[in-house]
Amino acid sequence: MFTKQFVVSEICISLNGDFRHLYPELEQFATTVLEAQGNMDVMSAQLPALLRAIADHQIIFHGVSNWGEVVGNEEDAERTLSLTFQDEAGRYAQSQQTGTEDIPSDWCVITLSFCYESSTPSAAIETKIRSIESVLSAFQQLSAISEQGSLRAFNLHWSPAGLGDNLTEDQVIELYPDLAAI
């Protein structure tokens, strides 16, 4: 007999280069999800396109970090995901305190935090991601989880949030110390 578990995970990717074409995809996903008031069916339908858009920028992937935790019940999953959301929101707030610069940022950090229900955690997501190929494999697995209806929650953060904002290399190093170069 298989017992379903909740798996809370996070994948964080830093990009270094021209990522301006990714902003509309990020904004469209966020707007669609907000308009749907967090409806998981809408989110699950939109997620594969978002992941493809991020994957299209793999040439400028610079670093990645990930983690996952298996929890036994929905309340613990919600608590863990909420803490993850608060941590990420705090990093975002810190990155925005420096203001904007005249030179557009070459750095962007995208964080995907999510919870899914499964009898076994996904190896592609839960093992240490240390290459572009493993990022793409994790994206494929996350898309499959979404399409299977097993995704229970999803949060998306990105910094800088707009084209006029800036994120420096020093901020990436300070705020995202777990990123490993890929």
Image: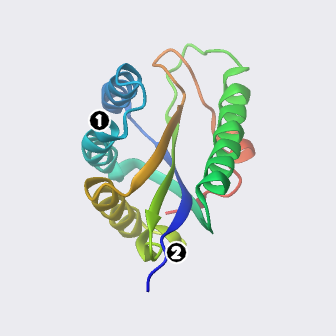
Q: Is residue 75 visible?
A: yes
Is 121 or 92 nearer to us in this picture?
A: 121
Q: Residues within 10 Å of mark 2 (few under 14, many from 20)?
A: some
Residue 24, by quadrant, is top left
Q: Earlier in the sequence, mark 2 or mark 1?
A: 1
Task: Answer with left or right where residue 26 lies relative to residue 90.
Answer: left
Q: On the image, numbered disc 1 is attached to which residue?
A: 42
Name the outermost residue toward the front.
Answer: 1
Task: Answer with left or right where residue 41 lies relative to residue 128.
Answer: left
Residue 3 to residue 103: above or below: below
Q: Residue at x 62, y 56 (%)?
A: 179
Q: Residue at x 34, y 67 (%)?
A: 137
Task: Answer with left or right where residue 132 lies relative to residue 155.
Answer: left
Please tell me whether mark 2 sits on a helix, a strand or a loop: loop
Residue 37 to residue 101: above or below: below
Is 79 or 57 nearer to us in this picture?
A: 79
> Residue 113: percent from the left, percent from the top?
53, 48
Q: CA distance from mark 2 to mark 1?
A: 28 Å
Please tell me whether mark 1 sits on a helix, a strand or a loop: helix
Residue 100 to residue 24: above or below: above
Q: Amino acid at mark 2?
A: Thr
Is 59 or 177 nearer to us in this picture?
A: 177
* Nearer to us: label 2 or label 1: 1
Q: On the image, numbered disc 2 is attached to which residue?
A: 127
Residue 174, by quadrant, is top right
Q: Amino acid at mark 1?
A: Val
> Residue 126: percent from the left, percent from the top?
52, 70
Task: Answer with left or right where residue 28 lies relative to residue 88.
Answer: left
